[in-house]
């Protein structure tokens, strides 16, 4: 399910707190009367964004049962007390609350990524426990702008620069972001106007983290015209275009796939047909083919680790600079991507598991 996620770059953004009707309108498709969900878990950290989400949800007539959840990552002193503060406000608002603790050893590197994965895992687990099929988070327009900037710095293509989707699948559930088009300042103002207490996470301004460093650049970029609104509109446009290209690629993969001699673990595509596609579509066909083989391998080995998708730069070098020219010129080509061997020949492109590399002895 998808919802609009932001105003036009040239539309003036509303300011000031959300009024109750505006909050209800943003949340109604997800938790209002007639919403197509059995129940919802509200992810509330205690910051102003998620506190506003909880408060607005409590003000409107809920059409589904609601449970507030606070994930205590245990990464800094006071996190348990902050969870208790959320529980107190939830009780005041008439909402059930659960504290979810991230236990066990914490990684020394990429701690924010690991915490994010743990957070979503705990939220999804609680949703299943209470019979809910929806998780709501309070990501804002500012979060979207920061995400686009981070992915731009990382060299992402259109799919990455599309940013966060208004909703996506989460382990058989739906994760939705109803405030994705709302500036953070309005949610802070909402909490202040309603006297909903909130806390500020010091990691949001900690220069050790890339997102915090980029957050500090946003006012400078806005002064040059690159506002959070424009970055969010860019993400919406790229998401629209990416959906069209991905749909074309999925249809092309179905049309170009051929019987694969040699059993499972192989995928064969019609070479001339692939080479005749626009390069943007052909590149996505190759990416979908890689994903399909990885999915098949994962089904065959339940304990196999989930492989990372190939980096866009690597896929571009292999497909655009090697495989497609070879198909057009009718010559053989062999390249590896993400543990798979791409080989051309006989008018076909074959993807198969990369053969094990031969270990050279000292005598050779």
Image (spheres, helix red, strand yellow):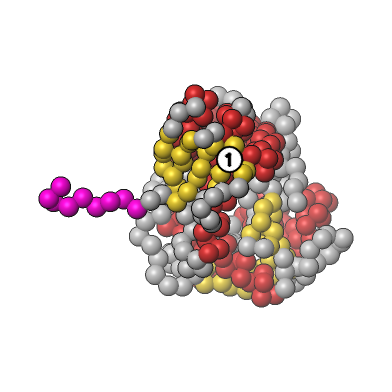
Residue 309, image x, y percentages: 50, 48
* Picture layout, residue 74 above or below residue 258: below
Asked if residue 23 shows in the view, the reply is no
Helix, strand or loop at label 1? It is strand
**Picture quarter containing residue 32?**
bottom right
The range drawn in magenta is 356-364
> Given the current orientation, which residue lies at the most extreme right position?
34
Image: 130 above or below 11: below
The rendered magenta stretch, by its main secondary structure, is classed as: loop
What residue appears at the point 84 percent right and 64 percent down from the top-left corner? Answer: 63
**Residue 204 at x, y = what percent?**
49, 50
Quickly name the residue at label 1.
269
Q: Position of residue 294 (x, y in %)?
A: 52, 54
Q: Is residue 36 above or below residue 99?
A: above
The question of residue 322 being in magenta is answered with: no
Q: 218 or 66: nearer the eye?
A: 66
């Amino acid at each position: 399910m998808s919802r609009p996620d932001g105003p036009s770059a040239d539309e003036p953004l509303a300011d000031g707190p959300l009024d109750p009707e505006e909050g209800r309108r943003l949340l109604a498709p997800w938790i209002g009367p007639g919403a197509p969900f059995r129940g919802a878990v509200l992810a509330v950290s205690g910051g102003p964004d998620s506190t506003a989400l909880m408060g607005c949800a409590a003000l409107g007539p809920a059409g589904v049962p609601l449970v507030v959840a606070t994930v205590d990552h245990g990464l800094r002193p006071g996190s348990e007390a902050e969870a208790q503060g959320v529980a107190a406000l939830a009780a005041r608002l008439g909402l059930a609350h659960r504290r979810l603790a991230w236990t066990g050893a914490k990684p020394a590197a990429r701690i924010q990524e690991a915490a994010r994965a743990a957070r979503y895992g705990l939220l999804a687990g609680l949703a299943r426990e209470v019979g809910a099929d929806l998780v709501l988070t309070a990501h804002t327009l500012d979060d979207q702008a920061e995400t686009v900037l981070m992915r731009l710095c990382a060299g992402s293509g259109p799919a990455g620069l599309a940013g966060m989707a208004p909703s996506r699948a989460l382990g058989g559930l739906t994760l939705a972001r109803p405030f994705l088009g709302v500036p953070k300042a309005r949610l802070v103002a909402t909490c202040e106007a309603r006297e909903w207490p909130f806390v500020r996470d010091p990691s949001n301004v900690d220069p050790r983290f890339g997102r915090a460093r980029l957050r500090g650049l946003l006012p400078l970029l806005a002064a040059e015209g690159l506002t959070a609104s424009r970055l969010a509109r860019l993400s919406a446009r790229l998401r629209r275009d990416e959906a069209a290209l991905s749909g074309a690629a999925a249809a092309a993969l179905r049309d170009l796939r051929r019987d694969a001699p040699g059993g499972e673990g192989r995928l064969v595509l019609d070479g001339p047909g692939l080479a005749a596609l626009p390069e943007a579509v052909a590149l996505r066909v190759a990416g979908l083919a890689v994903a399909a083989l990885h999915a098949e391998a994962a089904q065959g080995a339940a304990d196999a680790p989930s492989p990372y998708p190939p980096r866009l730069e690597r896929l571009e070098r292999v497909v655009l600079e090697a495989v497609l020219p070879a198909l057009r010129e009718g010559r053989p080509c062999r390249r590896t991507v993400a543990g798979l061997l791409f080989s051309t020949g006989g008018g076909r492109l074959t993807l198969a598991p990369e053969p094990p590399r031969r270990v050279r002895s000292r005598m050779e």
